[in-house]
Image: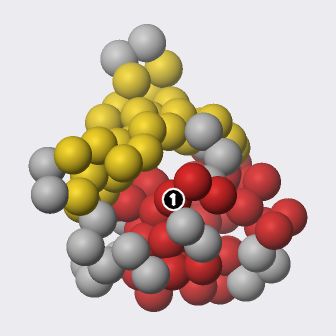
Amino acid sequence: MWAMADIEVNKRAEDPWEFKVMLKEDDEVVGEYIVNMDEIEYARYGDDIEPEELIEATFKFLLAHEEPEMILVEFNLHEIEDHFPEYPDRVRDYCNQ
């Protein structure tokens, strides 16, 4: 896992359900991503936490399973489940870690 990576999540101004995520290590950007979700995905995966927290937890989950360069540059949350069926049940485990 990339425990040393800092995860920076920013909501895109033009779309409240689109987020820009930057992974940084020692203040150097090691990955940039665009993540989309909709209200249905938010309700399914984490409606009891802030959307930004869900995105951060998602990246912690992904980094526990693969290297940053293996993460798609742009994706929707529901696509994670295609590769990691345990994602819906485990993503909240990565909140506040």
Identify the residue at the far left of this view. Answer: 27
Q: Is residue 10 left or right of residue 31?
A: left
Task: Name the residue carrying label 1.
Answer: 68
Image quarter of the N terminus: bottom left
Query: Dot 1 lies on which element?
Result: helix
Colouring? secondary structure
Q: Is residue 15 left or right of residue 69?
A: left
Give the answer, above or below, for where 12 lies relative to 57: above
Image quarter of the C terminus: bottom left
Give the answer, above or below, for where 42 lies relative to 5: above
Dividing the picture into quadrants, the one containing residue 2 is bottom left
Q: Is residue 73 left or right of residue 3?
A: right
**Residue 3 coordinates in the image, percent (x, y):** 31, 79
Q: Nearer the viewer, residue 49 or 69?
A: 69
Identify the residue at the far right of this view. Answer: 82
Give the answer, above or below, for where 78 lies relative to 64: above
Q: Callout 1, which amino acid?
A: Pro
Dividing the picture into quadrants, the one containing residue 62 is bottom right
Judge whether residue 86 can be spotted in this image: yes
Q: Is residue 18 left or right of residue 25?
A: right
> Which residue is painted at 14% across and 57% down in the image?
26
**Residue 84 coordinates in the image, percent (x, y):** 76, 75
Q: Nearer the viewer, residue 2 or 83?
A: 2
Identify the residue at the far top of this view. Answer: 14
**Residue 33 coordinates in the image, percent (x, y):** 50, 39
Q: Residues within 10 Å of mark 1 (few under 14, many from 20)?
A: many
Give the answer, above or below, for where 12 lies relative to 45: above
**Residue 19 coordinates in the image, percent (x, y):** 44, 35
Judge whether residue 58 can be spotted in this image: no
> Which residue is painted at 31% across and 36% down in the image?
10
Dividing the picture into quadrants, the one containing residue 79 is bottom right
> Which residue is painted at 53% across and 34% down in the image?
34
